Image (cartoon, rainbow, N blue to C red):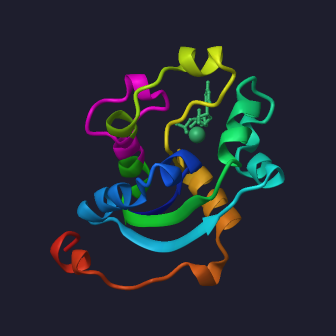
Amino acid sequence: MIERTLVLLKPDAVQRSLMGEVLTRFERVGLKMVACRMVWVDKAFSKQHYAEHVSKPFYPGLESLITQGPVLAFVLEGVDAIEVVRKMVGPTEPKGAAPGTIRGDFAHVSYAHADERKIGIKNLIHASANKDDAKKEIALWFKADELHSYKTVHDMHVLE
Ligand code: UDP
Ligand code: MG
């Protein structure tokens, strides 16, 4: 099933100049970027995007991380894209993320390290967790006319 999912390269990824390397991974597997925007998130918008986490103890650290510089927000489209992108991103804690995943290849820190310093865990990237979240998050970040439908060579060589 063709799905769309929201991805954010968080300020740590942008400031480490990892945008190109990460985007290349998604392009390489044939996922299609259908929207893209650079946004400096403010505290109010962070609370909307991370609504499910606002009351959790780690939220202040997360908010301070996500608002510390611009993020690159984009929408990827592909077969079971939500699950595939989460697989490529890896689990939340970089220490436990396998090599080959984005979090496992570009970070290594643990929850314990972040908690001790009362900071958010710097894990580079956000990706929608499920269909409901993807729908809500894409609508929060993009207007309908910012989402594009177009053909790539993958439509012929990967999907068909
Ligand atoms: N986070 C954190 N400390 C925690 C749990 C989460 O700093 O103990 C941050 C981390 O940046 C994570 C984000 O909050 O990516 C959202 O948490 P979630 O559990 O939704 O993880 P994700 O879906 O990003 O893997
Ligand atoms: Mg999440």
Q: Is residue 14 left or right of residue 105?
A: right
Q: Position of residue 57 (x, y in %)?
A: 75, 23
Nearer to the camera, 131 or 71: 71
Q: Position of residue 112 (x, y in %)?
A: 55, 14
Q: Position of residue 141 (x, y in %)?
A: 66, 65
Q: Is residue 153 left or right of residue 129?
A: left
Nearer to the camera, 22 or 34: 22
Residue at point 49% right, 20% down? 110
Residue at point 37% right, 39% down? 106
Seen as rendered, the residue at the extreme right is: 44
Residue at point 41% right, 34% down? 107
Q: Is residue 22 left or right of residue 13?
A: left
Q: Is residue 31 above or below residue 25?
A: below
Q: Is residue 116 above or below residue 106?
A: above
Seen as rendered, the residue at the extreme left is: 157
**Membership of 101 in magenta stretch:** yes
Nearer to the camera, 80 or 64: 64
In the rendered view of the protein, which quadrant contains the N terminus?
bottom left
Residue at point 44% right, 63% down? 3
* Quarter of the rendered structure image containing ligand 1: top right
Q: Is residue 62 above or below residue 2?
A: above
Q: Position of residue 123 (x, y in %)?
A: 50, 37
Q: Is residue 58 above or below residue 68?
A: above
**Membership of 106 in magenta stretch:** no
Q: How many marks?
A: 0
In the rendered view of the protein, which quadrant contains the C terminus?
bottom left
Q: Is residue 151 left or right of residue 158?
A: right
Q: Which residues are magenta?
A: 86-102
